[in-house]
Image: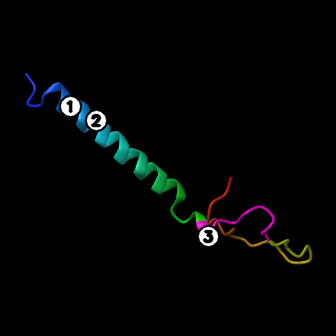
Amino acid sequence: MSAFSVDQILTLTELLVILMGIGITWAVYYGSDRAELPGEATIPDPNEVDESIPDTRGRTL
């Protein structure tokens, strides 16, 4: 037998699913205000040499 009743298990499951949804939403949107959006990227000068180590910070597709 379980220490919880059926109603308590359902309530606990609902609470955990809601908290997971909030956590996933936070993980997706955290720092998204600093993301480089289409049209905001600078166009590099074709006469300059490419960087040896690209800047991989930020969010990309």
Measure the C-alpha gap from mark 1 to mark 2: 6 Å
* Image location of residue 22, percent across then percent down: 41, 51
Quarter containing the N terminus: top left
> Can you identify the residue that label 1 sits on?
9
Say above or below: 5 vs 53.
Answer: above
Residue beneath the point at 25% across and 31% down: 10
> Can you identify the residue that label 2 sits on?
13
Residue beneath the point at 86% across and 78% down: 48
Mark in the foreground, 3 or 1 = 1
> Can you identify the residue that label 3 sits on?
34
Q: Which residues are magenta?
A: 33-41
Q: Is 36 contained in the magenta span?
A: yes
User: Is 29 or 59 nearer to us in this picture?
Assistant: 29
* Image location of residue 52, percent across then percent down: 72, 71
CB contact under 8 Å: marks 1 and 2: yes
Disc 3 crowd rating (10 Å Cα; few below 14, some 14-19, many 20+) is few
Q: Is residue 27 left or right of residue 11?
A: right
Q: Say which quarter of the image contains residue 42.
A: bottom right
Provide the secondary structure element on which disc 2 rests.
helix
| Secondary structure mostly taken by the magenta-highlighted segment of the chain | loop
Residue beneath the point at 42% across and 45% down: 21
In the picture as drawn, the residue positioned furthest to the front comes out as: 7
Measure the C-alpha gap from mark 3 to mark 1: 40 Å
Q: Is 59 contained in the magenta span?
A: no
Measure the C-alpha gap from mark 2 to mark 3: 34 Å
The amino acid at mark 3 is Arg
Disc 1 crowd rating (10 Å Cα; few below 14, some 14-19, many 20+) is few
The amino acid at mark 1 is Ile
The amino acid at mark 2 is Thr
**Mark linked to residue 54:** none
